[in-house]
Amino acid sequence: METIHSIRPLLAILASLFAIPLIVGFSRRPAMREFWTFAAAGSKFLIIVSMLPLVLTGRRVTCTIFEIIPGVPLQLTVDTLGLLFALVSSSLWILTSIYSVGYMRGLGEHSQTRYFCFFAVALSATIGVAFSANLLTLYIFYEILSLATYPLVTHHQDEEARSSGRRYLAYILGSSIGLFLPAMLISYHLAGTLTFSASGFLGASISRKVLMILLIMFVFGAAKAAVMPLHAWLPAAMVAPTPVSALLHAVAVVKVGVFVIIRIITGVFGVNLLKSLSLTTPVIVLACITILCGSLIALSQDNLKRLLAYSTISQLSYIVLGVSLLSQRGLTGAFIHIPMHAFGKITLFFCAGAIFVATGKKNISEMKGLGRQMPITMAAFFIASLSIIGLPPCGGFLSKWNLVLGSIEAHRPLVLVVLLVSSLLNAGYFMPVVYKAFFFKTESAVAGVKEAPLCCLIPLCLTAIFSIIFLFYPQPFYELISHALKCIIGAGV
Amino acid sequence: MDFLLTHLVAKYNFWLYIILMMIGLYAMIAKNNLIKKLVGMNIFQTAIILFYVSIGSKRGGTIPIVEHIAGGGEHAINPTRYVNPLPHVLMLTAIVVSVSTFGVALALAIKIYQRYKTLEEDELLTRIRES
Amino acid sequence: MTGNYPALLVTVPLLAAFVIYGCSWLHKRSCLFMALLGLTIPFAISVALLKKVLINGHISYHLGGWDPPWGIAYELDPINAIVLVAVTTVALVNLIATSKEIETRFSDRRGAFYALYLLFVVGLLGIVATGDLFNLYVLLEIASITGYSLIAMGDPARAPLSSLNYVFMGTIGACFYLLGVGYIYIMTGSLNMADVHALLPPLYHSSAIVVAFIFCLVGVMIKMGFFPLHSWLPNAYTYVPSPAASLIAPLMTKVMAYVMIRLMISVFSPKFVFSSIAASNAVVWLACLAIVMGALMALAQRDVRRMLTYIIVSEIGYIVGGAWIGNATAMSGAVLHIINDVLMTFCVFLSLGAIARSTKGYQIENFSGLFKKIPVTMATFVVSGLSIIGIPPTCGFFSKWYLILGAIEGGHYGFIVVLLLSSLINIILFFRIFEEAFFVYPKTNAVHTEGEASIAIAETPFVTLIPLVLTAILLIFTGIYSGSLIALIIKPVVSAGLL
């Protein structure tokens, strides 16, 4: 594979960091401050898109910054998988920025400058994770992301926000320092390198027991993926303002978690090694448990954002499950679930936020008959929930289709059952919301409510429309994924 | 008996310095009065000075000044006749160090006394806690 | 002139100290200038020496032209050259940053303060550079005695007593070291480190040498505040005046840790330390205990400064543990951690000193709402806190990296667990403060909307702020360049002595 040296990956990361001094500098002029946020988001997206043709023609873009530890440089490499993830997060950042403006102004939130700054840092770190060429670089950006999102979680600064922030840090930093770091050091000790490679850098000479322990440590160490039992931070983090929950806790942060697991499985261990030793069975079991439990807990939630959080926990494990099936279809399903779930879930969060801005309501039981007051929002909600359940005409259907095929391909009928049961459960917790909104009598509390401001409405319509478009036009994703699969599976098969 | 001769009597200087050191250490740990502790500290330091001085000395050795008696210069100097001067010189420095440490410590004790009007440690601690 | 750099390194601040004290009677305002001069010259010299050592290798300087083992030699290898640079940098930057506070707080005693400050630096520089065992003792006592006096200049209610307790412990430590040197002298007849190193191998089985080593080690461990012997440290470092705190707290314990490593490598040999004594496992376990106990005791403190002193106890455990695991990686980690810890502790104490201007005390409650008031100062505090926790890309992460890697190589899994545990406890320790400073409004100000206007920004003066920010940036740069630090400076020396 041809390698191009370019500073473009680095620029993509720095684009949002450059904006921070400007955001701080214009803290007293909100319009300018938000302009710089858009400028950063737009330029980041453009830089990432500009690398698309290079990567699609089978080249990879790398940028070595410098050697930190002998044999382990701080290095960025853009491959198809990283690019897919970077594209999703950076494009959604633009929409979220529009939404943020509407939401934060609509509610008259405090400390907006801090909010926009740390949002920018978080996005830098996310792109950093996507483009990391080795485990150490990835770990560094992973930790930066953990720290950058902490002030966003505790944004409200009240007792609840602070205790949630504490829980967030305890889970995220605790697992990454307690499990991920030692696992990484042991890998370095065993292999002498940390650079991802298509066939994995942990050789077969290492005993099965050690590999198994390492894999488990890595999976739990990336607690951002919210694999049970390390999931409790995600519902707690829902105290954050809704745009944060939307972009970070449905797209960036949690997807970074699963992205790390994908990298671990495909880049550190290598699919073939795992397959030959059938190491991923415990991960599959964990993912199945998480899928079912997450959906079951979601059924009992009344707070809309918490419901979405549990739904996210269960959906993330679809991706973990798909990767650990190690079959071509399973991997395809997992990869395509990243954009599909991102667009679907962000729409749902946008809707929840729009409802909150318009009515001040957080609980589903208080939203009866809201469909008549806020038809556009609730229609978008309906479309997005179809996508998450995995029904046509939405993109989510594709990922579920591939995952189901993958489970058959991998000869795991139980997984198939889990996937189907989970779809039923998904319908079980989403449909009542839609049903109540459209077919119940409007409660006096929400009577006379209007749609949320345009700034909130437009992004959520766009993401909902994209969710539909992706079903009919998934080619770009498929193309990226087939390139990625060629590297991952083609390397050895 | 042999043991006594070889270990106790022949190396009496070591035993002496150890005993002195222990006396000093005991005073530093067990005494309540800060001045007594300081005295203990000084004994402790002196014990080590004694140890150094004793390792330089030789039975029958004299002060290390080469005698210039008539014709004496033609004889080879016999080192066994002189005590080793180096440890003694080192101890000059050590004494200076111990004196200055002692000085600083006394100054501190005076400061403490001026403020709390006592040098008994238990009383000091209760007064600090009260204030 | 350039040939005499090692001597000038020590004599310039030494002379400056006396000149300053004399000058303080005549012209008070020139004291600061002379103190700055007296530290800038050694700083420049140490940088020049580092460069020279990196190009030409080991430098051996014979004071007064007397060849060792008769005369005193100053030996410079890359590691102690970099430690020298760290010492002079911290001393100089700290003096600049705290000069304003020194001038106001000690206006009538400033001559004494500067003189003690410089003498303390003389002591440390000498300790690091000297190649003579007895000379090390004398310089150690110079540093200690000036340290006692500097500490005693703090809070008049508590400082003298804590300083006196430090005097007792410190003297016992120095005496033990002296005793150990005495035994070495009895057995070898030499005091020069290189000479002793060459003479010792046939004597490794001798119990007198083992006793000598243990005495020296215990003495040094008391001075560096290694866990069971740390009792003097928290009080002494809590009540020291803040301009001296950011000098003494980072330097004294770390320089002593360096002395330990120097004793292990250049006086005795790793072969003796790790095979003849075979106590390395026990010492590593003790270090584990030190780390855990330091962290737990830090957890029990509500006073931030006191909490930091216990963190120092824990950090010393890192260094001792790394040095005693007994392979090149862990030893490199220990040496790197000495340098990193100097910088981290310096940054955290310096920013704490600057923060103290805006708070009434060092209790965590006093920190509420500080971020709004002094954003930049708090940011430096956060960076140093993250470095102590060990979050990349700050330097603390990288020394931890080598320490853990060394522990994996050495098969010492207890040490790994303890290192990770202490990182986790450090997270709690620091985020407790961050949370208070960032997200809690001061009680008088219960307004929850855009509060910027209601709380006046009272940022630290520039003379303190700029050095502080530079130090914080340095923490990140040291982290990023730790690879070259290891490869160029530490590895060559360490792997020459170790496996």
Image (cartoon, coloured by chain):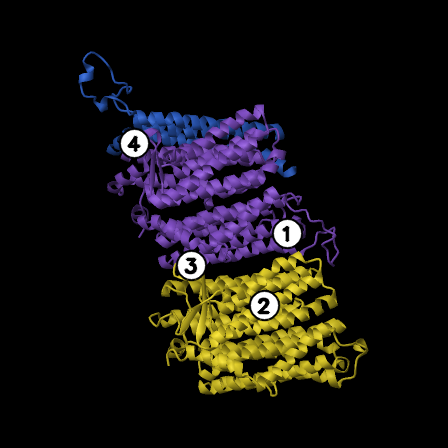
Callouts 2 and 4 close, C-beta under 8 Å: no
- Chain in blue, by letter, is B
Q: CA distance from mark 2 to mark 1?
A: 29 Å
Q: Which residue is mark 2?
A: A43
Quarter of the image where the C terminus of chain A is located = bottom left
Q: Colour of chain A?
A: yellow
Please provide percent x and percent y for residue C23: 55, 25
- Of A126 and C367, nearer the camera is A126
Q: Chain of mark 4?
A: C
Would you say C470 lies left or right of C264 here?
right
Amino acid carrying mark 4 in the image: Asp
Instruction: Give SS at disc 1.
Output: helix
Instruction: Give SS at disc 3.
Output: strand
Q: Colour of chain C?
A: purple
Q: CA distance from mark 4 to mark 3?
A: 42 Å
Residues packed near mark 3 inside 10 Å, few (<14), some (14 to 19) or many (20 plus): some
Sequence order check, earlier mark of 2 and 3: 2
Residue A480 appears anywhere in the view:
yes
Residues packed near mark 2 inside 10 Å, few (<14), some (14 to 19) or many (20 plus): some
Q: Is residue C387 above or below residue B52?
A: below
Amino acid carrying mark 1 in the image: Pro
Q: Chain of mark 1?
A: C
Which numbered disc, 4 or 3, marks the residue closer to the eye? 3
Q: CA distance from mark 3 to mark 1?
A: 32 Å
Q: CA distance from mark 1 to mark 4?
A: 55 Å
Q: Which residue is mark 1?
A: C375
Q: Chain of mark 2?
A: A
